[in-house]
Image (cartoon, rainbow, N blue to C red):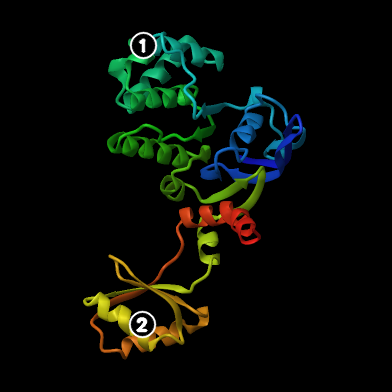
Amino acid sequence: MKFAVEDLRKSFGEKQVLRDVSFSTESGRAFGLLGRNGAGKTTAIRIIMDVFPADSGRVLLDGKPMVREKVNVGYLPEERGLYPKVGILEQLLYLGRLRGLTRHDARKNAIKWLSRLSMEEYAGKKLDTLSKGNQQKIQLVAALVSEPDFVILDEPFSGLDPVNAMLLKDVVRELIDSGKIVLFSSHQMNYVEEFCDSIAILHHGEIVLSGSIRALRRSRGRNRWLIQAGELEKAAGFCRERLWELVENVTLGKEGVTVDLRREEEAGALLSAIGQSGLAVDGVQLVTPTLNDIFVEATTADEAEGSEGK
């Protein structure tokens, strides 16, 4: 299956929340929809879920308008959406039936996912008796109880300790490997980077950057290098004093000496100079930007421009 949104626009009163938002993904892949608070992510997700319509634009599945009632979608919202005073298994069965399952299949699926997330002992308890992390795991079970083909995960790791985060990571990987479409929204860039092939970054309702994470990282420039050496202060001094024609910034850190080349094409000259320096060098490697670096740059560029103009 291939999923796409094309030219989504949405306004609430005079406030335009989405402006010509387009992106696409397909089965067996995770796509990251990213943005700062208020960027429009939740609005886009609610349009996809048919909570309310877009003012214009299309939501497509295999090139045709997606009819929400005909597509099995599992949605894990950022906000808690289950009943706090109702038994966990009881409401999972209710949600499964709402999505078209027989009572038998709803129960079988609920028990399966409760067991997979080590939550079967809580089946008879009420939601508000559980910790925040365990409530999040029950929310995930509710999203998966219908065995959806399309899964939307909004801040799925919220409130999880490292052990439960590892468990959830395994589940997300299983969903991707089993051919699901996974739409992933999170501010935790390490998880996005781990699961997603491609991303779109929303800022003030517009997509300001999109594409494969690998391509985006490679496109951000190749002028920063990390030098690892036995005597870091000596290495930093050498770079400042002897390589000033090649480098413009030298930073001494715990991992090594980071240098910024004045021109990317001078990488060969840098490596040659270090090789002939006599320093006890353990390694020299290109430093590529993290997804967090790319996100911050893409969503603060207009603020930086505004501050320069003041």
Which amino acid is tagged 1? Answer: Lys
Q: Is mark 2 on a helix, strand or loop?
A: helix
Residue 249 coordinates in the image, percent (x, y):
43, 75
Amino acid tagged 2? Cys
Observer-side mark, 1 or 2, equals 2
> Residue 222 at what x, y percent from top left?
49, 72
Which one is nearer the viewer's eye here, 310 or 177?
310
Q: Is residue 70 above or below residue 221?
A: above
List x then y, in percent, for residue 146. Answer: 50, 22
Q: Check disc 1 and report the residue beneath it.
A: 126
Which residue appears at 69% of the width and 43% of the height? Answer: 21
In which quadrant is the N terminus drawn? Answer: top right
Q: Is residue 144 left or right of residue 232?
A: right
**Is 72 on the left or on the right of 53, as rendered?**
left
Residue 239 - label: 2
Circle 2 packing at 10 Å, graded few (<14), some (14-19), many (20+), is many
On screen, 239 above or below 175?
below
- Give the numbered dot on residue 55: none
Residue under the point 39% across and 35% down: 171
Identify the image quadrant of residue 166. Answer: top left
Distance from disc 1 to disc 2, alpha carbons, whole Å, reads 63 Å
